Amino acid sequence: MVKGISRRVVVVDSPDQRFFEQAIFIVRNDAAGEGVTSRELVEEARRVARNYAGGDHGKFSRVWRELSPAVYTLMGAGAIGLIWLIVALM
């Protein structure tokens, strides 16, 4: 279905095209009325795309993402066991 509405978009090319070629952002209709320049729109689109791609995350968050689910399970079981021990000794 095609609607008769034209929209403004910002297209950002991916720096690493292994998985994605481009990111397409649909610009809100009221963005132009707020005094936002085209350059600001493109910079904001690049910033958002970089954040979603994981480019601004540090080494610590990458380690958490790569942990095995078994490690999360053991950490949760250990935390529950510690809480149970604290409550039982009180």
Image (tube, grey):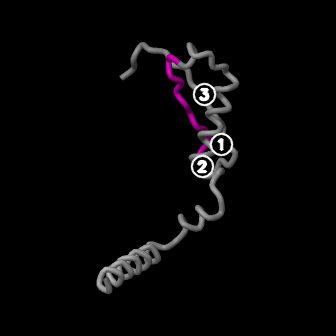
Asked if residue 61 is positioned above or below residue 90 in the image, the reply reads above
Q: Residue 39 appears in which quarter of the rendering?
A: top right
- In the foreground, 12 or 74: 74
Which one is earlier in the sequence, the residue at label 2 or at label 1? 1
Asked if residue 58 is positioned above or below residue 17 in the image, the reply reads below
Which amino acid, mark 1? Ser
Residue holding disc 2 = 53
Q: Residue 51: image x %, image y %?
A: 60, 46
Any magenta on residue 86?
no
- Residue 36 located left or right of residue 26: right
Please give the name of the residue rendered at 63% of the width and 33% of the height, measured from the top-left corner. Answer: 44
Alpha carbon distance from label 3 to label 2:
17 Å
Query: What mark, if any, has residue 10 been given in the picture?
Result: 3
SS category of the residue bearing label 1: loop
Q: Residue 25: image x %, image y %?
A: 55, 31
- Check contact, mark 2 vs mark 1: CB within 8 A: yes
Which one is earlier in the sequence, the residue at label 3 or at label 2? 3
Alpha carbon distance from label 1 to label 3:
13 Å
Which amino acid, mark 2? Ala
Q: Residue 23 appears in which quarter of the rendering?
A: top right
Which amino acid, mark 3? Val
Magenta segment boundaries in residue numbering: 20-30
Residue holding disc 1 = 14
Query: What mark, if any, has residue 72 been given in the picture?
Result: none
